[in-house]
Amino acid sequence: MPQAKFLGHSCVAITDGKHNLIIDPYITGNPQAPVKAEEIKANFVLVSHGHGDHIGDAVAIAKRNNATIIGSFELTTLCAKQGCNVHPMHIGGGHDFDFGRVKLTIAHHGGGYGDDASVYTGPPVGFLITIGGKVVYHPGDTGLFYDMKLIGEMNDIALAFLPIGDNFTMGIDDAVRAVEYLRTKKVVPMHFDTFDVIKTDPDEFANKVSGAEVMILKPGETIDF
Ligand code: NI
Ligand code: MN
């Protein structure tokens, strides 16, 4: 049974016991991070977009572990220039890896990298990951979009991580609608409380969701899916 460990903000580590994936490893500088970037073991590093709170420690983790960065063509090109192994992909495309499959989905958000966000790193993406026979959806940073209904119809999603912090992404009410569209069995709220502007109450999200099991994970907590 695959496991997902929430590492704060939008950072999630997924393992099937053999392969280790980490998504959006914003660890250094993340006040919620329960680990140090130097402790992360990963074979694959998935990065949804170039904002610092997502690309985070990706390059350092990938180099130290000799891991492969998976993301958009533009973002992986930037990581390759910094000496990383990469697997470029793009929205709508899927690829079979040794652990399973990754498909990139749309996300409605920005894609700038660097202190002034001036380096174009492509459109932001989300990830549909099949591992251990289960599908997990990590949408990156996004607003609600109606194609989530299509994603839910076409995939038997066991677990979804959804941003609920508002301001930069979906807030609670839109995330509740996303759960309905995605028909996920389990959902974990993310991208909240890290900064003042995205402080919110995950219990309100839990109370409003019906039809899925809401797991409010503290950074460092793990669930099976
Ligand atoms: Ni962002
Ligand atoms: Mn973000």
Image: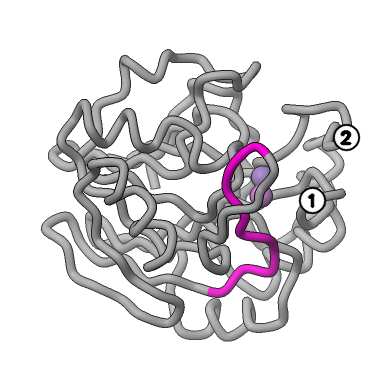
Which residue is label 2 attached to? 197
Please tell me which residue lies in front, 55 or 144.
Answer: 55
Vertical comparison of 114 with 33: above or below: below
Colour basis: one colour
Magenta segment: 106-115
Vertical comparison of 180 with 5: above or below: below
Which residue sits at x=44%, y=35%?
A: 223
Question: Which kind of residue does numbered mark 2 sit on?
Answer: Val
Question: Which kind of residue does numbered mark 1 sit on?
Answer: Phe
Pointer 2 residue Cβ closer than 8 Å to ligand 2: no
Pointer 1 residue Cβ closer than 8 Å to ligand 2: yes
**Disc number placed over residue 97 in the picture, else none:** none
Residue 23 left/right relative to 138: left
Please tell me which residue lies in front, 56 or 10.
Answer: 56
Vertical comparison of 180 with 71: above or below: below
Q: Ligand 2 is located in which of the four quadrants?
A: top right
Mark 2, Cα crowd under 10 Å, few <14 / some 14-19 / many 20+, is few
SS for tag 1? loop
Which residue sits at x=21%, y=26%?
A: 64
SS for tag 2? helix
Vertical comparison of 82 with 139: above or below: above
